[in-house]
Every structure is written in structure tokens, then in C-alpha cells.
Image: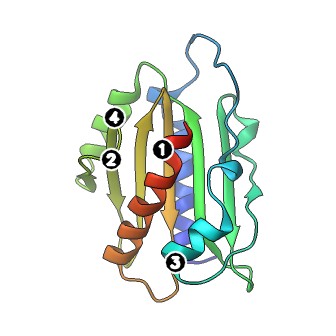
Amino acid sequence: MTLRTSLATLAAAALLTTPALSAAPRPAQPHAISPCALLTPDQIKVVLGTPVLNGKPGTSGASPGSADCTWADAHGETRIYLQVKDATPDYHDFRNSMQATGRLVPVTGLAEDAFYISATGSSAALYFLKAHHVMLLTVDGVGFSKAQNEAAERGLATQVLPKL
């Protein structure tokens, strides 16, 4: 498991288990969002410069209001991870708790709210909020620096947002 995959797993676990994002009464959503339908291998290839296989749905869908997808390269290495979770009214409490860690980096001009949670090495995780959904997007480009992974995350987020 790569550092990037570990970060994605840890970040997803934090997002799924944080009380600030726990299930709370919400109006029913008109339709469930399938993360694998939000990006195509061609869109990813344009950003990464390398091809990826079709997205594979993950297991976070076992949690109500949550679904995820991964796109791997031909060697089986996860290159893209996207999770979509219903935002609860306590979303900002979650954001504030992440800010308290000192690793939150705000991103302006992307969505209703967006920020990176940085880690060591070339890893970062982009969280963004739109239409009552919180998305977590991570990129692990081959040989990418942290800045390149963050730029790729932002570029792919701009492809996802119009579909929500």
C-alpha cells in the first residue's frame, strides 16, 4: 500500500467516522450519486498524462449517504480516489476540527467550500462541498510532487462539479 493509498484510506475513514458528519435527519436526495460516473478514464488521462482503467466502486457505500470509486493504472496502483458523502448540517464543525490540526489549506474559487489536508511527501487530499455533498479527491500521479498532485486534484474537481 502506497503512502497515497494510506492517506486516502485514512482521510476517508476520518470523513466517515467524524461525528460532525454523522447521519443526521436530512431531506431525501432526488438521486444517489455514483462517483464512478463523475470522471472518465479519458478525463483522468488528460490530467495525469497516463492512462487508467475504468473506475471501481469501493466499499464506503456501506455507510448511508456515502459512495466511493478508485481508478488504477495498468499495474494496479490506485491513481485516483473519489468519495462522495452527504453533507450534514455539522459539516463546518468537521472543517473546523481539520483546521485545528494545522494541515488544512483553504482553496478559493473552486466550490462552495474547498480545502486540502496536506500530509508528508507528495500526498494531499482535496475536500470540496457542493449541493449538499462533500467530496474527497486524492491523486497519486506517477512521479508527481505535492504541488502537481494538488493541481491534478483541483483540475479533476472542476470536471466533477458541473455534474452535481
Q: Relative to residue 26, is residue 93 drawn left or right?
A: left
Q: Earlier in the sequence, mark 2 or mark 1?
A: 2
Residue type indicated by callout 2:
Leu
Q: Secondary structure at mark 2?
A: loop
Q: Relative to residue 63, is residue 24 drawn left or right?
A: left
Label 2 and label 4: CA atoms lie apart by: 7 Å
- Give the numbered dot on residue 112: 4
- Above or below: residue 49 compared with residue 37: below
| Crowd tier of the residue under label 4, counting other residues whose Cα lies within 10 Å: few below 14, some 14–19, many 20 or above | few
Label 2 and label 3: CA atoms lie apart by: 19 Å
Is the Cβ of the residue at disc 2 closer than 8 Å to that at disc 3?
A: no
- Above or below: residue 130 compared with residue 80: above
Quarter of the image for residue 67 reads top right
Q: Earlier in the sequence, mark 3 or mark 4?
A: 3
Query: Which of 53/25 is in front?
Result: 53
- Give the numbered dot on residue 48: 3
The residue mark sitting in front, 1 or 4, is 1
Label 3 and label 4: CA atoms lie apart by: 25 Å
- Above or below: residue 106 compared with residue 27: below
